[in-house]
Image: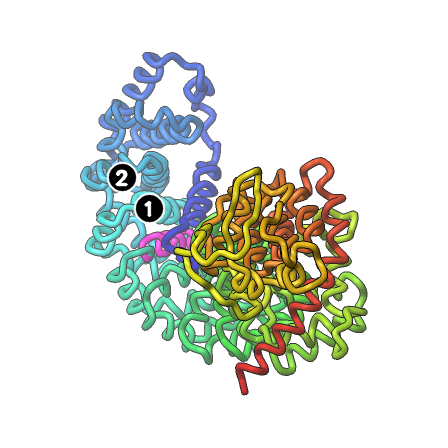
Amino acid sequence: MEQQRGSRSFPERKGQKRKLEEGPPAEDPQISPSTTTDAAPHAALLSEVAAQVSVLNSAFSWKESDRAAAKRAAQVLAELAKNAEDLVSVIVDGGAVPALTTHLQSPPYCEGDLAHKPFEHEVEKGSAFALGLLAIKPEYQNLIVDKGALPHLVSLLKRSKDCSTSRALNSVIRRAADAITNLAHENSSIKTRVRLEGGIPPLVELLEYSDSKVQRAAAGALRTLAFKNDDNKNLIVECNSLPTLILMLGSEDAAIHYEAVGVIGNLVHSSPNIKKEVISSGALQPVIGLLSSCCPESQREAALLLGQFASTDSDCKVHIVQRGAVRPLIEMLQSADVQLKEMSAFALGRLAQDSHNQAGIAHSGGLEPLLKLLSSRNGSLQHNAAFALYGLADNEDNVSGFIRVGGVQKLQDEEFIVQATKDCVSKTLKRLEEKIHGRVLRHLLYLMRISEKSIQRRVGLALAHFCSPEDQRTIFIDENGICLLTGLELLLGLLGSTNTKQQLDGAAALYRLANKSMALSPVDAAPPSPTQRVYLGEQYVNNATLSDVTFLVEGRKFYAHRICLLASSDAFRAMFDGGYREKDARDIEIPNIKWEVFELMMRFIYTGSVDITIEISQDLLRAADQYLLEGLKRLCEYTIAQDITLENVGSMYDLSEAFHAMSLRQACILFILEHFEKLSSMHGQNELVQRTIPEIREYFCRALKKSTTNLQSLRL
């Protein structure tokens, strides 16, 4: 549930892009525009590269003409590499790397050379810049280093120790640092080689250099070298870089504090000891200050760094909040910059894992923007927001806020991209459910009574999903079992709404409420017989032995025994014990019932059980209803309920009404609620829903009262 710095490299890439675009100053009018056009033929480009490489190879001396020629050649190669990245391979293939590497150092000084050094630092600067551009392509990084560029680049960094400073000196140092940055980018072996060549100490010293561009370049190089390299991290810290880096966080130059916060971020990543040292060195407040920076990149890095600080210990989480980080982080959640939102959500997620911070983040307005981020199609952003909400849900003071702003519906309805986010949301909903009792429940019931209608609905929906069975009656029906102005009426109101979304929410909540109640499960088993039975057994079914009554069904005789029939139902008792003509009749005709239906009915009477197929179930239901065989009737209802579909649920409901089949009717109601979304899109089915609402009301009132009674008896 954490955003790992190692999985992102956008700050480094942006820094490289900036360096690449700056380019060398266009100070030499002799550079031909034709050499930088993409339209130049490949052969011409090869010829141009070869010519410049030849110049570099022949002009390694202090002669003014050689220095001028070498400077121009390095600039031409740099322009080619900068303006067309696909030309880099042509330049490398043309032998530019060893030639440029040679010019990273000053030529040997021979007797007779001029007393002054023409173009001092400038040829080296151009060569470093050109090599840095070539190193943007990862496949050439090792080649450049293998040709010996690193020791020369480190030597250029050390020119800062010269007593005099100049624009040219500043530029060559900066270009050397930039070249190291590009060479080491995502190349672990080169990062190590820079350290072994002694490149880290001079880079740390350059953080205090007088030129701000050099400071920035040195910080950029250290940032790259520190990324995923523990030995480099430790050496950077041992060189006493932290005090200067922390001071740079407060720079008015956005480029400087952006690089500085990036260095610190890479130093602390996966390094608990360095993290503690950075915090103890006073970095916390300056980093929080960067949350309000005008530089989005610095804000982003600061938020990510605070998230890493927050993982140190609980005290650090509290200190970050106390020092004012929450409000700017919440403001960043509403930025148009996706990565800025992602990092601020990451930081808030870490802070929200501390109980002291959870209520404060919600109270400061963090809930709604975090919930909105769940709609993002960016998987990392969505997950960071979900993780933050998971933390906030741990505090019962936030539960009402979640529900009041529609957070429960948002968590339930949103589509989540990765499984980890789905798991996180599931745990968040579980946390909320566990807190719906005591003062939280009392507050929600208060809101359901006095709030505006939209909030009342949200509360009713949430309680339907989250309440415990023992609280259902309190929430959804009043003390007298009447549903007036209660949670149930709110849900039924949604079901009867003209708004499709409200109908779907109401149906889902009612179905969830049904499943949470012991008395509200679908008809998944036939209940025991409601009356005491006498079963003669299978061997007496249609057996003439001791038979004292015969039924004529479809012209066929069916032998029966009055004692068994008298015990089976009131209908047979009335037939044989009342004033009906069948009382003394030996043969009784049974009209309108098929033989197989009558046989199954009698088999149930004699044995108490029978296998019912779906094909015969409806005819058998009619017979069971006619002869008041409640046990058989319930078995038929159970069988019929297994065959309810989207297409036939209406006719099934009509069947339940026609034969007062309560179990089947309940099964139809639950089916309608469960499959409401699909049913609502089918022609004519909405009328069925509206027709069943009164029955749904009665059903829930009966069931909730019964559920409460059952719970009380269980306790006793």
Front residue of 315/609: it is: 609
The residue that mark 1 highlights is: 185
Residue 433: percent from the left, percent from the top? 56, 70
**Whole-percent x, y for residue 421 in the image:** 47, 55
User: What's the magenta region?
Assistant: 209-226
Q: Pointer 1: residues within 10 angstroms few (<14), some, or many (20+)?
A: many
| Above or below, 452 relative to 82 | below
Given residues 38 and 634, the one toward you in this image is 634
Where in the figure is residue 486, as x and y percent of width and height? 76, 70
Asked whether disc 2 touches disc 1, contact meaning CB atoms under 8 Å apart, the reply is: yes
Residue 206 left/right relative to 141: right
Q: Quadrant of residue 505?
A: bottom right
Q: Mark 1 belongs to which amino acid?
A: His
Q: Is residue 64 magenta?
A: no
Element carrying mark 1: loop
Q: Residue at x 69, y 79 (%)?
A: 442
Which quarter of the image is occupied by the N terminus?
bottom left
Tell whether 542 sits left or right of 634: left
Q: Residues within 10 Å of mark 2 (few under 14, many from 20)?
A: many
Q: Quadrant of residue 322?
A: bottom right
Can residue 168 be seen from the camera position used here?
A: yes
Element carrying mark 2: helix
Q: Which residue is mark 2?
A: 141
| 211 part of magenta stretch | yes
